[in-house]
Image (tube, rainbow, N blue to C red):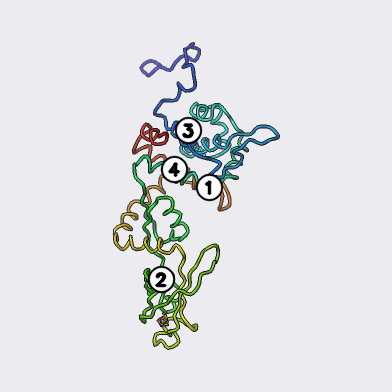
Amino acid sequence: MAGFIEEADRGQLSLLPGSLDDWVGKDNPVRVIDAFVDGLDLKKLDFETVDPLDIGRPGYHPSVHLKLYIYGYLNRVQSSRRLERECHRNLEVMWLLGRLAPDHKTIADFRKDNGAAIKKVCGQFKTAAKGVLGVDRLEAVADRGYFNGEEIKACDDGGITVTLPKPMTSGAKSKGRFGKQDFVYLAEENAYRCPAGEKLTYRYTNEENGQTLHRYWTNACRTCPLKAKCTQGHERRITRWEHEAIVEAVQKRLDENPGAMRTRRETVEHPFGTMKMRMGATHFLCKTLPKVATEMALCVLTYNLTRVLNIFGVEKIMEAITA
Ligand code: SF4
């Protein structure tokens, strides 16, 4: 076809690069996936079959599947059957897996059986991201629908400072009585001050649903003129979670920075839109909530990876990961 760019002759003999490594450029993101997964302690993250079995045919190391899934979700190939095909025809995947090519059932089983561990990998990437950014803590802003004491504590432990408003769902408040927010915690005295100015002192601690809870009340309730607006029982009792201070700090941060929620509203749809587009804007491939949560974790992980790659480039991330 004269006048157009000419294709190469398929029969032409050529001198190909000698090794698989020569086909994958130094700035290829696949190198980041490789270095990131190799740097993880998969046993500590609770991946299955990290140690070889004593009997039977040798299996694949979990790092093989984890690399394959991260590559797949980064490149819009989420299905195990399509990932199996990529193992046979995609040079980047061949490089990443050292030419291993698991079948689709083995690939799918890995995602099914390692959901909790894959979610932990998400957290590990945040640690790597902090290294790239050169910071000790990350900041996150969420809306009140995500308010969960355990999750807030997990973020705090993981070096993420969270800002979000507390949900106003007090049952007492909805019935016209004082809510917990009307009681002020006095940290030095380990007591609460109620709307009548009385002090609810610490009484005892017990465990409920795995949480350690402290209980407070006062004997002044029986003669209190505000009792009808406070409780229908003998006295009003206030419960305090052992890590409640972390939760209170979250609300305090928001009070000091009221513009945070506006910033969130302006920026939050972009990540969701990008993730939906990358997934094909259709549906999750797995069924049941835990498996969908695993897929979501892979989506979030690869979204974060893409953002860091776009902002800092492969070279800087490789330096941080391998440091
Ligand atoms: S009923 Fe008890 S807790 Fe409630 S305002 Fe009166 S003294 Fe305070």
- The residue identified by callout 4 is 125
Between tags 2 and 1, which lies in front? 2
Considering depth in this image, is 92 or 138 the residue closer to the camera?
Answer: 138
Q: Which mark is residue 294?
A: 1
In the current view of this chain or complex, which residue is farthest to the front? 188
- The residue identified by callout 3 is 34
Counting from the top left corner in percent of width and height, residue 273 is at 40, 47
| Dot 2 and dot 4 residues touching (CB under 8 Å) | no
Cα separation, mark 2 vs mark 4, equals 38 Å
- The residue identified by callout 2 is 190
Of labels 4 and 1, earlier in sequence is 4
Counting from the top left corner in percent of width and height, residue 258 is at 29, 61
Q: Amino acid at mark 3?
A: Asp
Q: Amino acid at mark 1?
A: Thr
Cα separation, mark 4 vs mark 1, equals 15 Å
Cα separation, mark 2 vs mark 1, equals 41 Å
Q: Residue at x 37, y 72 (%)?
A: 184
